[in-house]
């Protein structure tokens, strides 16, 4: 359970540090009239609510994956574990996801710089690469099954299907939000702040899922 | 003092008042309506769970007298009773119910930050409840694996409900976790981002603190339950061997190889122990506010109380294996987990002392919410102290499978939070409905519930010391159990049925209040917190009329010296009223 504990400790330490800053040296019992200038939030103003919610969601997802990895580490220690050989296709998929993340970053920068003509091509290319990743993962499953590597063969196989499946579902969730943003851009609302915010948040999510995939892939390769 | 408060959303987000009955009461995005929906649903399933416990008690008190209780459905009753009470009643009621109602009102915001997501959270929760209830009616019935759902027995033939019951239970839990996550992200974001001007973190009422930290715990701990539920579903349906060891069942080899049931226990309790505090922390927070309000005194040691909540929350993640002493572990691990468990007693004891010190020399009004709050201190100290027994490996081993444990966890996380739930409902009832309840009926309800629960659980500790085993359908003839143990069991059953029956008083009071109850004042308890200062009573959609409130002080300015009233609401400016103990006698 060490992996789960370390990730949780990091999340809690971040929260704790912030809480300490808020509460240190305050005297709550002292009444003070509030001035209008004293009006700012933990991450700027209230338009950042979605960012806070996203960061909280990423903390939840981190806890989820860290706990699967804890289970992975514990299960691996038992006698019947046989390491599996990962399909080579995973490398191609990884490249696609890296590219998707890079293109999303480029799209985000374009949105921030008001280069609206780049948004639609950027979003479409990101979607294409990401969909390519998910389809590639599915093909990798099929290749494994064709070579007789079923989920029941060994716990290492079971974890492979579980981890890749869980990761793909999170990507599909991201694609749902991506599809909404892309539709809005395609229908013409390129310049508004809501779209820019959506693209920024999606970019963070994409980078995060890339990071999770790199950790998972590294772990799968090394065990 | 750093101000972290925002969300004058009037300029950014229009609040369309719901027009039709459906958008107002069914598909409502108003946090207050969603809170009531959560509350009603949770109490409804809670009553089912209460009924199940009555069935169990009938068998234990009067063995084999009732033909409709057999060993199979006895285990189904145990399982569903535990799971419903912990997850679908207490978690949903404290966070979905009180969290939804109190966070925006106490923080001075118009609603949750994401009202649509909030609505979705309730409806997904309802789906999880429906899936759970369907499992009573499928072939083989609901699962009888115990609320901990330990493999291998949870999915092997011989345990009730291994065909469909366990599948529906795991599916229902997964759906519940999705619902909770949607709600939880909302609560956290609202507390962080939508507080009114002047509502610094250290001015938040302790109710909000308790709910906030419990939500953080839930968001981080529920994934452990989700992971274990998914893996168990795989073991059951796809024949993987995450948890399932090589095992022979009914003389046949089901095909599992080398999995680890202990792995499940780790994951389950990694969720399971924080879950205790997901239920307890909101209760801690709410009871602090109730005690302070009805004792007309500021809460003793506010900052300590906040940091105790945070410390308990953090520590709750490193004590889980004390639920697994009997599963066997390295003695050093046992030592570690016993130590961390006992350390939790420190911040918890700080809270208890502070509650008692809040009462000391207070102007105590023994109204119904106060009675429930004081009773909570009794039951919580009681359950907490037996927790110190069980936290030690050497004491836990002989007691773990006895009624001592049943008595302990019911006192600490059954009776105590439920007393707070009742106290809180009585306290906020006038705000929610605009009506007063019947005080006499409320007091009868309190005394019968409080004394009745003691009559149930106090003897159970004794049964535990006698070695009477828990989980057994029938005790059989054993020498170590005196015949009087059965008499005590019969007494406990009578008490349990009595307490269950007296809850009718509560519902009579609800109906009486709604139909005949007098209108309440907007602030009948002379409370300081913002929810009592709304322009409309009960508060309307958007809560605050045209202008958001501004918070100028903490929530505990009661009996401030030199001020005519014995309370100063949080939205009264500093120049209009003295400011706590620093400037107390200037006016």
Image: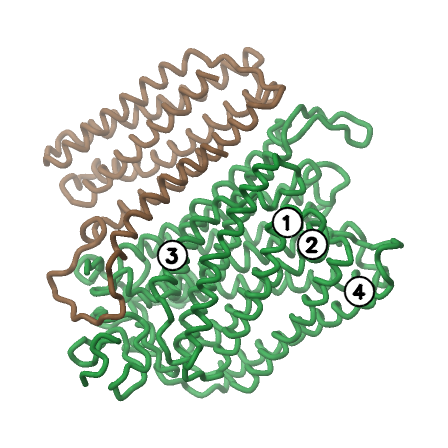
| Left or right position of B305 against B317 | left
On screen, B466 above or below A194? Answer: below
On screen, B481 above or below B289? Answer: above
* Cα gap from disc 4 to disc 2, whole angstroms: 15 Å
Are discs 1 and 4 less than 8 Å apart at CB?
Answer: no
Q: Residue under circle 4?
A: B61
* Other-residue count near label 1 (Cα within 10 Å), few / some / many at <14 / 14–19 / ≥20: some
Determine the secondary structure under disc 1. Answer: loop
On screen, B358 above or below A189? Answer: below
Q: Residue under circle 1?
A: B147
Quarter where residue B139 is shown:
top right
Nearer the viewer's eye, disc 4 or disc 2?
A: 4
Host chain of mark 2: B
Quarter where residue B479 is shown:
bottom right
State the residue in front, B9 or B85. Answer: B85
Q: Residue under circle 2?
A: B78
Are discs 3 and 2 less than 8 Å apart at CB?
Answer: no
Please provide percent x and percent y for residue B515. Answer: 50, 83
Are discs 1 and 2 less than 8 Å apart at CB?
Answer: yes
Q: Residue under circle 3?
A: B212
């Amino acid at each position: 359970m060490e992996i789960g504990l370390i990730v949780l400790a990091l999340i809690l330490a971040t929260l704790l540090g912030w809480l300490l800053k808020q509460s240190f040296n305050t005297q709550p019992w002292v009444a003070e009239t509030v001035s209008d200038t004293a009006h700012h939030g933990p991450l700027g103003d209230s338009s950042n609510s979605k960012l806070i919610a996203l960061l909280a969601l990423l903390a939840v997802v981190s806890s989820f994956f860290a706990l699967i990895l804890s289970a992975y580490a514990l299960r691996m220690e038992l006698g019947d574990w046989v390491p599996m050989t990962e399909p080579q296709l995973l490398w191609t998929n990884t490249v696609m996801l890296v590219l998707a993340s890079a293109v999303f970053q480029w799209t985000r920068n374009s949105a921030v710089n008001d280069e609206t003509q780049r948004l639609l091509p950027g979003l479409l290319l990101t979607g294409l690469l990401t969909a390519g990743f998910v389809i590639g993962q599915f093909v990798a499953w099929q290749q494994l099954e064709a070579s007789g590597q079923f989920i029941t063969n060994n716990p290492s196989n079971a974890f492979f299907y579980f981890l890749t499946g869980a990761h793909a579902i999170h990507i599909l969730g991201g694609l749902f939000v991506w599809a909404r943003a892309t539709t809005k851009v395609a229908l013409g609302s390129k310049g508004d702040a809501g779209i820019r915010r959506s693209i920024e948040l999606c970019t963070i999510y994409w980078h995060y899922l890339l990071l999770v995939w790199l950790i998972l892939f590294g772990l799968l390769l090394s065990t | 003092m750093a101000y972290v408060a925002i969300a004058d959303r009037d300029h950014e987000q229009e609040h369309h008042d719901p027009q039709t009955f459906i958008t107002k009461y069914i598909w409502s995005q108003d946090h207050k309506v969603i809170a009531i929906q959560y509350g009603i649903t949770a109490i409804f399933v809670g009553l089912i769970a209460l009924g199940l416990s009555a069935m169990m008690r009938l068998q234990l008190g009067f063995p084999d007298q009732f033909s409709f209780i057999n060993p199979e459905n006895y285990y189904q009753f145990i399982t569903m009773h535990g799971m419903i009470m912990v997850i679908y009643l207490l978690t949903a009621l404290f966070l979905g119910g009180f969290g939804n109602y109190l966070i925006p009102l106490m923080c001075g915001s118009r609603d949750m930050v994401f009202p649509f997501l909030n609505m979705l959270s309730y409806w997904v929760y309802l789906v999880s409840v429906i899936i759970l209830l369907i499992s009573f009616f499928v072939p083989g019935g609901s699962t009888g694996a115990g609320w901990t759902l330990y493999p291998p027995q949870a999915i092997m033939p011989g345990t009730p409900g291994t065909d469909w019951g366990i599948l529906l239970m795991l599916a229902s839990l997964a759906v519940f976790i999705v619902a909770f996550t949607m709600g939880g992200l909302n609560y956290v974001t609202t507390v962080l981002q939508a507080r009114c001007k002047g509502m610094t973190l250290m001015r938040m009422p302790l109710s909000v603190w308790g709910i906030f930290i419990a939500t953080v715990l839930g968001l981080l701990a529920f994934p452990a339950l989700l992971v274990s539920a998914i893996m168990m579903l795989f073991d059951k349906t796809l024949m993987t061997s995450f948890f399932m060891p090589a095992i022979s069942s009914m003389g046949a080899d089901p095909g599992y190889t080398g999995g680890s049931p202990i792995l499940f226990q780790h994951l389950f309790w990694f969720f399971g122990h924080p879950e205790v505090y997901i239920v307890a922390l909101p209760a801690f927070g709410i009871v602090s506010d109730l005690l302070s309000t009805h004792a007309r005194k500021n809460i003793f040691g506010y900052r300590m109380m906040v940091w105790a909540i945070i410390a308990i929350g953090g520590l709750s993640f490193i004590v889980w294996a004390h639920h697994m002493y009997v599963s066997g572990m390295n003695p050093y691990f046992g030592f570690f987990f016993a130590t961390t468990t006992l350390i939790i007693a420190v911040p918890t004891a700080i809270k208890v002392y502070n509650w008692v010190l809040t009462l000391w020399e207070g102007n105590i009004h023994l109204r119904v919410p106060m009675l429930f709050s004081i009773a909570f201190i009794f039951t919580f100290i009681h359950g907490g102290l037996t927790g110190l027994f069980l936290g030690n490996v050497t004491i836990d081993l002989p007691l773990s499978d006895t009624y001592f444990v049943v008595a302990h966890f019911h006192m600490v996380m059954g009776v105590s939070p439920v007393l707070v739930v009742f106290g809180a409902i009585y306290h906020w009832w006038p705000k929610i409905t605009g009506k007063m309840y019947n005080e006499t009926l409320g007091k009868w309800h309190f005394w019968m519930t409080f004394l009745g629960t003691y009559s149930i659980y106090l003897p159970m500790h004794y049964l535990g010391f006698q070695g009477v085993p828990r989980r057994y359908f029938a005790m059989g003839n054993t020498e170590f159990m005196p015949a009087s143990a059965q008499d005590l069991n019969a007494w406990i059953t009578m008490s349990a049925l009595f307490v269950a029956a007296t809850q009718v008083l509560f519902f009579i009071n609800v109906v009486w209040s709604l139909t005949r109850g007098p209108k309440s004042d907007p602030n009948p308890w002379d409370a300081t917190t913002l929810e009592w200062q709304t322009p409309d009573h009960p508060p309307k959609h958007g809560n605050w009329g045209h202008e958001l409130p501004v918070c100028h002080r903490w929530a505990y300015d009661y009996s401030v010296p030199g001020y005519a009233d014995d309370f100063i609401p949080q939205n009264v400016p500093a120049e209009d009223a003295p400011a706590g103990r620093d400037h107390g006698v200037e006016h």
